[in-house]
Image: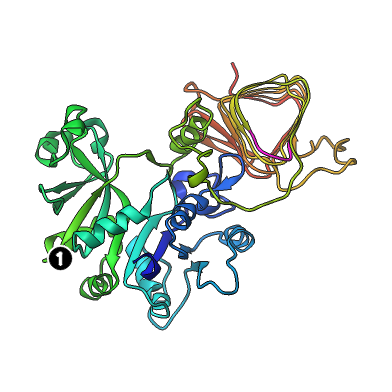
Amino acid sequence: MLDTTIAVILGGGRGTRLEPLTGKRSKPAVPIGGKYRLVDIPISNCLHSDIKRIYVLTQYNSASLNRHIKNTYQFDLFSSGFVDVLAAEQTPYSQHWFQGTADAVRQTFHHLEDQTCDYVMILSGDQLYQMDFTKLMKSHQENNSEVTVATIPVVAEEATDFGIMKNDANGVIRSFIEKPDKEVLGEWKSEVSEELKSSGREYLASMGIYVFNRDVLYQLFEDHPEAKDFGKEIIPKAIDSSLKVSSYNYTGYWTDIGTIKSFYEANLSLTDELPQFDLYAKDKMIFTRARLLPGSKISGTRLDRAMVAEGSIIEANHIYRSIIGIRSRIGSETTIQESIVMGNDFYSSIDELNPQNNVPPVGIGHRCHIQKAIIDKNSRIGNDVRIVGGDHLKDEVGDQYSIVNGIVIVVKGGVIKNGTVIGAG
């Protein structure tokens, strides 16, 4: 069954909810966990589930994503496996950009016609989870389903943020509502286990993960040419038709990281003593580009709940509950707290380490204090810089840094000169 399944990963549009991190890259290419990219999560889940034919759909700033995929996912000459990026393109069938998730798959469906497949799995490119798709596909087949929606049980307080499915005792979805109001929530409880019911998790939220029989997906596109989105249009229309639409209930860790706040929190949660997303599980490792960097060099630094990627050179005083990305350079007497430092794509030369014209080298300088911040790649933070994020800050957008939900984000390649103070009273 898995060898007749093709996975399609939705890379999203402009990724405005993740700006400024998506200002110079597509959403799936955003770094996470110090050394990975968002797209590595769904691809790794596929590969662990023996699904090796994967398309990634994107249309904005796709150059770095193309480069990452080309340098990372290479199969041997005798394998039919591939990970290919399909960007929006003009064809005889369409002259437009992708208008939504369903429209993106519809416009690229002709690529699937060149592949032998019975099932199409639709995945999101901006979620953090570790799912065995083998179980999902087995459920789809054993239930003789034509469409399967992966759902996760949530409590009432969370249900208003999701599309909520209501299924019967056989796991067949009977109705759907998008982000229901609190006043009508009581009508949307599903049949769940006693354990879930006792914890109040009686609402089944769509995870944005779907399995379609290939011919069924094609027919849905033919019957509803105006439908642009899976969650809001295609899935409800499938439920309202005579198709068998089933729910696959997933109870493991899953989070949508499509906003700056959720991205920040998901990253910092990786520093927990027992993180819910386990990067260290041998059978669930996340695949990414092998860079062959030297081990990190750390001098006189107290590390507390910190993750430090390879190739870093660190002289800081203290790093607490932070992610330090590849090739990071952090100067002496510097403190970093609850922050994400994405690292660098290159090392500064000896000449650059003695900067002229008040332009700092890549990395973070001496005697700095960085707190509740995201320092994007290749940023240049000078000496004696103080960046303190928090709820006291209002949102703002700038050339070198922005503030979103109290989090200070230094843009990719941003320059913060010596002595600059951001957010501190």
**Magenta-tinted stretch:** 308-312
Q: Quadrant of residue 357?
A: top right
- Residue 331 painted magenta: no
Residue 341: image location, x then y, percent = 63, 35
Q: Quadrant of residue 99?
A: bottom left
Q: Quadrant of residue 423?
A: top right
Residue 246 versus residue 92 in the image, above or below: above
Q: Main secondary structure of the magenta part?
A: loop
Q: Secondary structure at mark 1?
A: loop
Taking 386 as reference, is 260 left or right? left
Determine crowd level at label 1: few under 14, some 14-19, many 20+ residues with C-alpha closer than 10 A: few
Looking at the image, which residue is at 52% across and 52% down?
40
Specify the amino acid type for callout 1. Answer: Leu
Q: Residue furthest top?
A: 425
Residue 73: image location, x then y, percent = 58, 61
* Quadrant of the frame with the N terminus: bottom left
Looking at the image, which residue is at 22% across and 43% down?
204
Residue 107: image location, x then y, percent = 38, 73
Looking at the image, which residue is at 21% across and 27% down?
199
Residue 401 versus residue 80 in the image, above or below: above
Q: Looking at the image, can residue 100 be seen?
A: no
Q: Nearer the viewer, residue 66 or 418?
A: 66
Q: Residue furthest bottom?
A: 92
Q: Which residue is mark 1?
A: 243
Residue 30 versus residue 109 in the image, above or below: above
Residue 376: image location, x then y, percent = 62, 41
